[in-house]
Amino acid sequence: MDLQVVEQVARLNDWLAEGGVTILSGAGLSTDSGIPDYRGPSGSARRGTPMTYQTFTSDALARRRYWARSHLGWRTIGDARPNGGHLAVARWQRLGLLGGVITQNVDGLHQAAGAREVVELHGNLARIVCLDCRELTSRAELEARLTLANPHFAAEATSINPDGDVELDDAELDGFSVVPCRSCDGVLKPDVVYFGETVPADRVEIAFAQVEAARTLLILGSSLTVMSGRRFVLRAVREGIRVAIVNRGVTRGEPYADLVIDAPLGVVLPNLAADTDTYRFISP
């Protein structure tokens, strides 16, 4: 780390030592686990608009295309393991430094690292919901059913997307079969919030409450391009809560932040976690 970043990390260490930090994490936290982010350091989108709720629910062909691609993509998402950033956040929580963990990610890696009571704003790809009877089932079970239903499906993914599907030529979709809900034959969907779908209000309120109770809102790996995450920064500013951002590249939260560290999370966060060994904790 260069001198400026070292000084910035030291400042963030002081804030972390005070406790009462609420984390808001984005796709950039999971890139070191092999899951790409949406925009990259330049801020430009890496791909077109992902699947929308309206398209998924109204177009059977689009659903088949999604499930074929997602069936391939899950092999990467399901096998991903927490990186040093996820482990650092879990460790801060065990040390009593955090007041909450909110994530925009759908990969479950915070929990895999040991974090508890994570507010998953956009849901989790490891869960499947029936749009008719609302039964929740595991992704592992669905993957087993899809594999049995498609014994000759041998398509190869060309690249993985952050929302768990892959780039795949439509010609390779021939013969792929989608399975219905095991209980009511209804339409199955990942238990995640698609574009055009609304984050459940109770989930948002819990997240707002964690922000409002914080000394510091710490953004990890989010460009804050969409309002889904940026609204928490705006709420923190309104409440007089300081905002710190660690992100590789541009972020729309910079005008509101008290501290912005443009550096790899895989370098910054483990250093912060190591430094907490010597902290003297201050009660909120």
Image: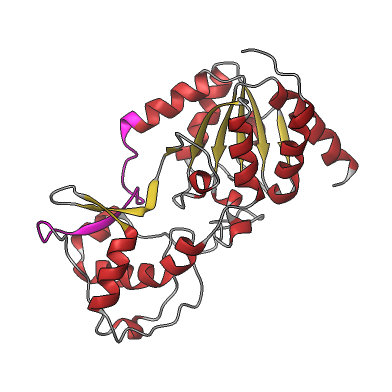
Residues 166 and 22: in front is 22
Specify start and end residues of the magenta stretch as a single range.
183-202
Q: Which quadrant of the figure has residue 50? A: bottom left
Rendered position, 215 above or below 53: above
Residues 137 and 168: in front is 137
> Which secondary structure type mostly characterizes the magenta part of the structure?
loop
Q: Residue at x 75, y 19 (%)?
A: 280
> Is any part of residue 227 visible from this angle?
no
Lateral position of residue 44 relative to residue 4, left or right: left
Image quadrant in which the C terminus is located:
top right
Magenta stretch containing residue 101, yes or no?
no
Residues 115 and 236: in front is 115
Lateral position of residue 252 relative to residue 72, left or right: right
- Considering every residue shown, the one lying at the far left of the view is 184
| Residue 58 in the image, given as x and y percentages of width and height | 19, 60
Q: Residue at x 49, y 59 (%)?
A: 162
